[in-house]
Image: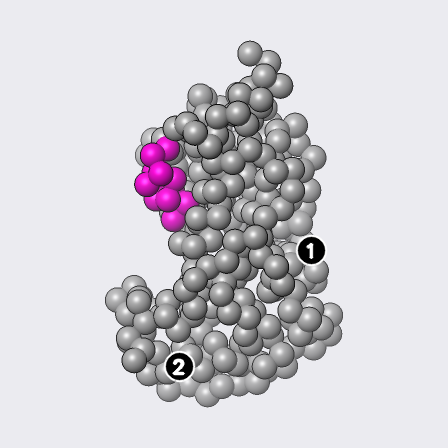
């Protein structure tokens, strides 16, 4: 079977068949929810990561990819790296290696997980995410890019970290629309089941709000004593945040769980929240 035939076959049966799907970064904040969601839908899912017992893969070198992808229909790339030393090797060069291995295995769909607004944010990590998207789009395998807004988990993690110094970043000018990772995972799973879009899908939370409001919600939910620090963001970054580039005006998929509800439901999950009444 040639590659064109393989792509045609995948597009024809994705919505109606049990698929073999590899999830790179399947143990991460988003990836583990993608794995759970796809398995709940009846698909056969392989978890690819450096620590995987069954499918150990290192995207920065390509080690393990050939064996991990053999017989798969779709790859979801939810891998991540925020280290300046490794993020390009993992996200950009890793995508190139991943797509090349998919092509060799005659796979028909590459789903790349990215970030809403990454092409409008002047930070190195976001520029790397744009380069990752470009690598996926330039590759020989049909693709879909799923951009999500910031996860509730990330927002809560930032507040938890800064609260140790008894302050919370709380600028009214930082516009956000956070989403629960489990709800973003559903959008990713939908994309994996569908035919390649050769385009982007955006997933966002239900509430467009500002960082100060989120900080106040977190402080109330956790009962932590921390000052709300306005901390204006200067320059191009500040303009991008004020313009709402981290939010989505018309998301293709929208979560239903707001930040306050999410915190209240996770009182025992390490975020220090107590139920909100």
The rendered magenta stretch, by its main secondary structure, is classed as helix
The image quadrant that residue 209 belongs to is bottom right
Which residue is pictured at 66% across the width and 32% down the height?
139
According to the picture, the residue beneath numbered tag 1 turns out to be: 119
How many C-alpha atoms fall within 10 Å of the one at disc 2: few (<14), some, or many (≥20)? many
**For residue 90, above or below residue 270:** above
Q: How many numbered marks are there?
A: 2
Q: Quadrant of the C terminus?
A: bottom left
Picture layout, residue 230 above or below residue 1? below
Q: Is residue 133 left or right of residue 12?
A: right
Does the stretch in magenta take in 35? yes
Magenta stretch bounds: 33-43
Give the vertical position of 189 relative to 276 (above or below): above
The way the protein has been coloured in the rendering is one colour
Q: Report the residue that reaches farthest toward the top.
A: 1
Task: Provide residue 234's location: percent of width, then percent of height.
Answer: 69, 77
Q: Is residue 53 magenta?
A: no
Residue for point 70% across, 35% down:
138
Q: Secondary structure at mark 2?
A: helix
Alpha-carbon distance for marks 1 and 2? 32 Å
Query: Which residue does the numbered mark 2 point to in the structure image?
Result: 219
Corner quadrant of residue 41: top left
From the viewer's perspective, tell me whether residue 205 is left or right of residue 84.
Answer: left
Q: Residues within 10 Å of mark 1 (few under 14, many from 20)?
A: some
In this rendering, does residue 146 appear at all?
A: yes
- Identify which residue, 227 or 256, lies in the foreground: 256
User: Which residue is rendered at x = 43% and y = 62% of the image?
Assistant: 256
Figure quadrant of the N terminus: top right
Image coords of residue 74 (percent x, y): 49, 31
In what element is the residue under mark 1? helix
Q: Is residue 169 above or below residue 73?
A: below
């Amino acid at each position: 079977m040639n590659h064109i035939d393989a792509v045609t076959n995948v597009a024809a049966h994705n919505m109606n068949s049990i698929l073999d799907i590899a999830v790179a970064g399947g143990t991460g904040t988003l990836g583990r929810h993608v794995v759970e969601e796809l398995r709940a839908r009846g698909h056969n899912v392989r978890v690819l990561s450096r620590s995987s017992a069954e499918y150990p893969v290192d995207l920065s070198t390509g080690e393990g990819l050939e064996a991990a992808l053999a017989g798969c229909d779709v790859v979801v790339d939810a891998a991540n790296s925020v280290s300046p030393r490794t993020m390009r090797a993992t996200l950009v060069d890793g995508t190139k290696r991943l797509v090349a291995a998919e092509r060799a295995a005659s796979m028909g769909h590459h789903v790349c997980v990215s970030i809403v607004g990454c092409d409008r944010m002047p930070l190195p990590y976001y520029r790397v995410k744009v380069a990752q998207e470009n690598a996926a789009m330039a590759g020989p395998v049909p693709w879909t890019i799923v951009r999500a807004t910031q996860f509730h988990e990330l927002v809560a993690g930032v507040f938890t970290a800064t609260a140790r110094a008894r302050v919370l970043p709380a600028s009214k000018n930082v516009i956000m629309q956070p989403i629960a990772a489990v709800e973003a995972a559903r959008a990713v799973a939908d994309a994996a089941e569908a035919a390649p879009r050769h385009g982007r899908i955006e997933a966002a939370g239900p509430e467009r709000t500002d960082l100060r409001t989120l900080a106040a919600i977190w402080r109330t939910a956790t009962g932590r004593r921390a000052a709300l620090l306005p901390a204006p963001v200067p320059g191009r970054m500040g303009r991008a945040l004020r313009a709402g580039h981290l939010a989505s005006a018309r998301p293709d998929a929208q979560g239903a769980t707001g930040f306050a509800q999410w915190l209240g439901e996770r009182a025992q999950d390490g975020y220090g929240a107590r139920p909100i009444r």
